[in-house]
Image (tube, grey):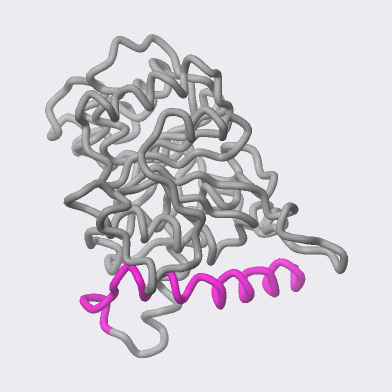
Amino acid sequence: MAEKIAQKTLLKSIPKRKTLSNKSDGGVVLVIAGGAKFMGAGLLSALACTRSGAGYTHLMTDLVRYPWVKFPDFIIHKFSLATLKKHQESVIAIGPGLGTEKSKVSYVRTLLKMKAERVILDADALTIVSQMKIKKLPASWVLTPHEAELARLLHVPVRNVKNNREYYLNEAHRRFGCVIVLKGHETLLASKGKITYASFGSVALAKAGTGDVLLGVIAALRAQGLEAYPAAALGVLIHGTAAKDWEKKGNDHLGLRPTDLIDQIPQTIKRLRSTAKGN
């Protein structure tokens, strides 16, 4: 049976800067996302990284369409295997709006070949994995599927996953061997043979783009030194609580935009940090 995520323990792991800290202490994230048709997906993940404390945020995306003036925050790269190989030691968040063509498949293969340790896969990267003959993934990797993506990874009907989320999450964890976050009304996480659940979220998150934000939050936490499971679990906590905090300001749940969620993150992290001190 799934156990509830230990919220008090997670709150104590919220990163903080010391007086003499600099940007290097925030770590480095490379976001690989936002192909020609879905530029916004990469921007959302990268923005969430910066809002969640990453020291350096690199974005590998479609440079032809990149809105330089509006988003000067990131170190921008064109899609390139050479750039990916230079970031072996970085946290790599890959998938939203990426596409699944052959050139993008090579990114996932390269990550495996160069034994990158801190990788988070979402969206199109999960589709790519589902089409590959992979026995195991590194235990330090994180997958963030919704129900349809988990079904695709396991090659089972979506209705099976919907009807027995915990069972199929465990099956995916046994197969791939890494941390898996099953997004949904009650988010489930699998790590080291154990299933935990989180009820921090809101129905306001049922909107395209909010998953891209979660990817960025988890990546930033990973870059700041958290291990795979704590980063994933704390990311889920911050993400879901931010949505609730936004609603508490008098907003209706129908109106949440992913950018609203990103703007809310700093206030939510500050409040959660204060809550941790109060405990």
> Is residue 157 shown above or below 56?
above
Give the residue displayed 54% in from the left and 62% down from the top: 50
Q: Position of residue 175 (x, y in %)?
A: 38, 15
Q: Quadrant of the N terminus?
A: top left
Q: Which quadrant of the structure image shows residue 188?
A: top left
Q: Is residue 26 visible?
A: yes
Q: Position of residue 271 (x, y in %)?
A: 62, 76
Q: Residue furthest right?
A: 20
Q: Nearer the viewer, residue 98 or 36?
A: 36
Q: Nearer the viewer, residue 84 or 224?
A: 84
Give the residue displayed 64% in from the left and 53% down from the top: 10
Q: Nearer the viewer, residue 74 or 227?
A: 74
Query: Does the magenta portion include 272?
Result: yes
Instruction: Answer with left or right where residue 190 lies relative to residue 148.
Output: right
Q: Position of residue 219 (x, y in %)?
A: 52, 47
Q: Is residue 1 visible?
A: no
Q: Nearer the viewer, residue 235 or 51?
A: 51
Taken as a whole, is the magenta stretch helix, strand or loop? helix
Over which residues does the magenta segment extend? 252-279
Give the residue displayed 21% in from the left and 29% down from the top: 151
Query: Does the magenta portion include 67?
Result: no
Q: Which quadrant of the structure image shows residue 277?
A: bottom right
Q: Residue furthest bottom?
A: 250
Q: Quadrant of the C terminus?
A: bottom right
Instruction: Answer with left or right where residue 263 lies relative to residue 100.
Output: right
